[in-house]
Image (tube, grey):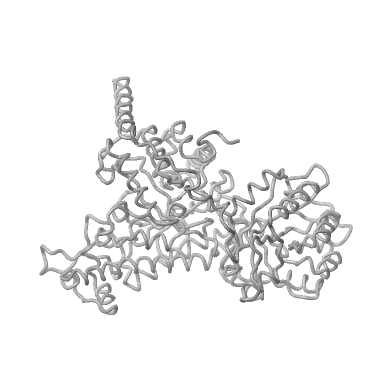
Amino acid sequence: MLFRLMRFRALFATGCIALLLCACAKDIPAFVPPDQRPQPAVDQAWRESHVLTIAYHDVADRDPDQTYLAVRTDKLIEQLAWLRHSGYEAVSVDQILEAKNGGKPLPPKAVLLTFDDGYSSFYTRVYPILKAYRWPAILAPVGAWVSTPLGEPVKYGDAIEPRAHFLNWDEIGEMSRSGLVEIASHTYDQHKGILANPQGNSEPAEATRRFDPKTGTYESEAAFDARIRNDAQLISAKIAAATGKPPRVWVWPYGAASGSAIRIISEDGYSMALTLEDGLGTVDQLMSFPRVLVSDDPAVSGYANAVRSAEAKSPIQVVHVDLDYVYDPDPVQVERNLGVLVERIATMKVSTVFLQAFADPEGDGLVRDVYFPNRWLPMRADLFNRVAWQLKSRAGVRVYAWMPVLSYEADASVDRVKRWDPQQSNQAATVDPRQYRRLSPFDPKARDLIVGLYEDLARYGTFDGILYHDDALLSDFEDAGPHALAAYRAAGLPGTIPELRANPDVMQAWTRFKSQYLIDFTKLLTQHVRAISGPQIKTARNIFAEPVLNPASEAWFAQNLDDFLSTYDWTAPMAMPLMENVPLAQSLPWLGKLVDTVAQRSGAMDKTVFELQSRDWSKPGAPPIDGAILTKWIEKLRLHGARSFGYYPDDFSNNQPELDAIRPAISGSWYPYKND
């Protein structure tokens, strides 16, 4: 019987794949002459007021030790020569601040050179090269390391280093007076990890609330602020004493920025803060300046590729993970599950994980518990930060915290989204049982609760972005609750649903009002998260396929593709044909149409990540979608020009979708060939 079932599934999958192949047999892209193809971002003109910032560390004449991310001296010279030959021009902090304040603009290909930690090689090897080039640079020493008395060893994390490996303040003062070297703060003694969760992860001190295993509690906001402020004041005083002027630039250890810490250093007079995020810096966002990290002592060819690729927005490959699959009442089993997940994601070599931060074991979309400490809802387990950090540090991916916008449990005093039923127009509006059970975004109590949850996620979670769930929608009969009706009247609209629907122009105005209201609410959530986690936090939001394919359906969802593209770093259409009742045989043309519709908007493909489905929720109990089918869907997306894509969910414990099938299709390291 088991053999027959397996054989049936194999035949079924083969038949489905055959149908898909037939559907795309004639889907051959038209030839486009080279001169008519879109110009790659790296070949386009340099954008005005942008700066490419490069992060170096140690420099050695031979055997560069990657403990210190060292490069060999001759390679550094080759790299700087390549920059100059390629038209890059090194700029100073003065030039950047002048451009920000409306003065002389930056040169067309501005580059900012930075050297972290305060190694003595900067004085003996780098400084002479800078003088020969007449190129400025930033030196960011760690105060405790360069303040270690001569002759005593330096405590370098958990290791002990010779004092001669680091600069002293006299050398730093001399280089500052040359006018070529800007001395920045790299903290006094916060270039280290601290305990970040009950499971024992050590995370960057400047961006982490310390966990106390004795009390089972986290560092308070007041204690965190005091720790950061005391350290900032100490390193600022040390630099001012050595150079005669206060420092203006802050460099985050490990590139881990913190919005709370940015507030503190801004109050202390800092004008610029450097991370290790991807991309180019802009003069209007000086407190979140990205840098290209130089590591593994690259040859000039690899260095050039890294520099040029920083000028373009990289596509992402996403695996969307339910934390409910990791959780277990037994902590030992949790660690086993986590190990399987991390190994699978690392093997896939994708770039990004959308990680569930809330609990939904019942699968009804209503959040009653979450996986992080907070003031509002029960915590199922303090698990989100543990899993996110393991994925980031061991699998090397970026993690987006996946959170609903409205679907949270609350007491009866908080207003829910209510639907007016035209068939029962004489009765009060009620919650629609066919939809997500959502809190009304128009109710101040609901807004405070949701904002508070996002703030606590930012305090106790480590992540790179937020994915706003698809529950942020309002139908053409919603919201009909009292706070919503009052908001419509305040906006100059009618205060009843029948009046709002009676006139097409009023109906359109009401639809646009709701769409923008939801957009503005997510902007508010983003603002609160960034205030705590830092401005580098990215945003993504799920959008249903219908508002993409049929703009008039905005009335049914209060979702608009153009709004999404102009608001979020990533728009995530749910490219899920079976969920939209599209037959499997027609799924490929449907996906092609979805991608083509997005591609009609200029630049949209660089901001869109298409999410496929690995389950058929339209058929309860249906087996997972075959990996070969999912692979065909990915190939279809690629064929129509999609650069970023992913799928949901990943059932890592059951190898669904099958790793051997999905890995070559989804990973940039495996498609179209393995890239070691």
Q: Note whether 297 is above or below 516 in the view shown.
A: above
Quarter of the C terminus within the rendering: top right
Vertical position of residue 380 compared to residue 506: above or below: above
Instruction: List x then y, in percent, for residue 477.
Output: 20, 64
Side (left or right) of 270 relative to 14: right
Residue 329 visible to the viewer: no
User: How many labels sit on residues?
Assistant: 0
Residue at 37 percent across and 44 percent down: it is 612
User: Horizontal and vertical percent for residue 243?
Assistant: 81, 72
In the image shown, does 288 or 259 lie closer to the viewer?
288
Query: Residue at image x 64%, y 76%?
Result: 103
Indicate the position of residue 557 as horizontal and vertical percent values.
Answer: 28, 59
Query: Is 254 located above or below residue 177 in the figure?
Result: above
Q: Position of residue 195 (x, y in %)?
A: 61, 55
Q: Is residue 274 visible?
A: yes
Split into 4 quadrants, where in the image is the N terminus?
Answer: top left
Q: Name the residue at 61% across, 70% down.
A: 225
Is residue 78 rendered to the left or right of residue 96?
Answer: right
Q: In the image shown, does 549 or 337 lie closer to the viewer?
A: 549
| Quarter of the figure with residue 520 | bottom left
Query: Does residue 264 appear to the left or right of 631 in the view shown?
Result: right
Q: Is residue 396 left or right of residue 549?
A: right
Judging depth in this view, the residue of 131 and 248 nearest the camera is 131
